[in-house]
Image (cartoon, grey):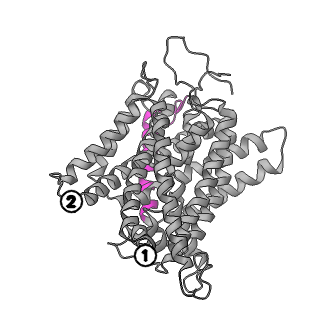
Amino acid sequence: MSSAANPPADVPRLRRSLTLWDLILYGIIVIQPTAPMPAYGVFSNAGQGHVVTSILIAMVAMVFTAMSYGRMARVYPSAGSAYTYVGRELHPSLGYVTGWSMTMDYILNPLICTIWSAKAMADLLGGTHFQIPYPGLIWPIVFAGLFTALNLRGVQTSARINKILCAIMGAVILAFFWYTIRYIFHLPQYPEAYFLRPFYNPETFTVNRVFHGTSVAVLTYIGFDGISTLSEEVENPKRNIFLATVLVCVITGFLAAAEVYGAQLLSPQYNFAADEVTNAFSHVAAIAGGPLLTKAISLTLLVATVGSGMGSQLGAARLLYGMGRSDAIPKKFFGAIHPKTRIPANNVIFVGVIALIGAFLITYDNGAELLNFGALIAFMGVNLASLTHYFVRGADRTMGQLIPPLLGFFICLFIWIHLSNLALIAGSIWMVAGIAFGAWKTRGFRGDLVNFDLPPDEA
């Protein structure tokens, strides 16, 4: 399948300005170096304490999937990401379905970041003399507006901000590790199997519990695929997208496992009440570092969520641009590029408005549960696309082109099956709505559903 012809010189295009290091930082910030901390209580409740095991199992699936993303980005360096890969390799209709499922994931991420940031800021200022009237109304507007305004300044501004955010979060994570290690070394004695309990607790272990925990723990990695949506804005995308995607998953997996391992060593508690779930990690950290560490982690999680909200909105805008450019959704609005900043400004504003409205309609818990539905469908699709391109149709077939995408697909499928009923029902409704829109757009699927045009090849 050949690329589209080069557009006229005066047509705005995305600018290639991001390095490999920018991509890695972008991926880490979108995922958050503190990714498992806000949802630690949720993960622990779902897996009955097997948080470390769940995160590591999820990492295996994500690394295999990341390899597929990186390989497909070599073939199609497009902002459409999984949407383009599946549509070009499997079938345009499957690409459309994949893109539709991803829009739920990508739009929900900045939405729940807006909700969490607004609540965190209200809580942080709750005990101070500085009071904001109507915080439930003001703070969602502030954070949705902040994410949108910063992303409208362009991708290079986002890259610079990512470096600052990463340094701040890294310092607090190191402080948590320091206090945790110091606390453990001063314990008078260790219970039996003390260091193994975070991996395996015989009192609560079952395969179903662990994989249900894994289906939630996938949230730790949500956003890594956003790296591939920047394929048209990175230097040497055929090399750097693959390296950045895999490295971000590995770094995130081991860092997240270390964080929750420390938390589980500090406290054996694995069931948290509803009013404890949101701040579970901060309360556990207080055992080792006291109120000072608790405040530092709370503030860091707010900073991390701001970074994640910015990054996920950036990825959502690029996905919508890829779908709009190929006319899967209205091209005039979603496929437009701002002539000065060279970004899909309409999409940035659109996602910001959805995040603001949604912040008043759903809860953080509900939004978080829905995220993984669309993401895992996209992950399975990309693994099949990679398998088809490199092994089924490829001339040089190797086991390295067969095993990783197959394992990635089946592990993601197994995790998807263990999603909550709420996620499966609401996600299915979203998919039915998308298919209905596709049927209307093509008059009963009699016309072309998608026109997958690719960006001009740039050496």
The answer to whether residue 188 is seen in the rendering is yes
* Quadrant occupied by the C terminus: top right
The residue under label 2 is which amino acid type? Thr
Q: What is the spatial separation of the Cα atoms under label 1 and label 2, in whole angstroms?
A: 24 Å
Inspect the image, locate mark 1, and give the three-letter code of the amino acid beneath it: Ile
Q: At x 56% / y 48%, what residue is drawn?
A: 224
The answer to which of 454 and 50 lies nearer the viewer is 50
**Residue 420 lies within the magenta run:** no
Residue at image x 54%, y 11%? 8
**The furthest residue to the left:** 133
Residue hosting label 1: 287
Magenta span: chief secondary structure: helix
Name the residue beneath numbered marker 2. Answer: 128
Residue range of the region highlighted in magenta in the rendering: 422-451
Badge 2 local density, few (<14 within 10 Å), some, or many (20+)? Answer: few
Identify the element where label 2 is drawn: loop
Residue 307 x %, y %: 43, 46
Left or right placement of residue 398 versus residue 386 in this view = right
Q: Is residue 307 left or right of residue 416?
A: left
The residue that appears at 59% across and 24% down in the rendered structure is: 455
Name the residue at the top extreme. 9
**Measuring 46% from the left and 36% from the top, which residue is drawn there?**
158
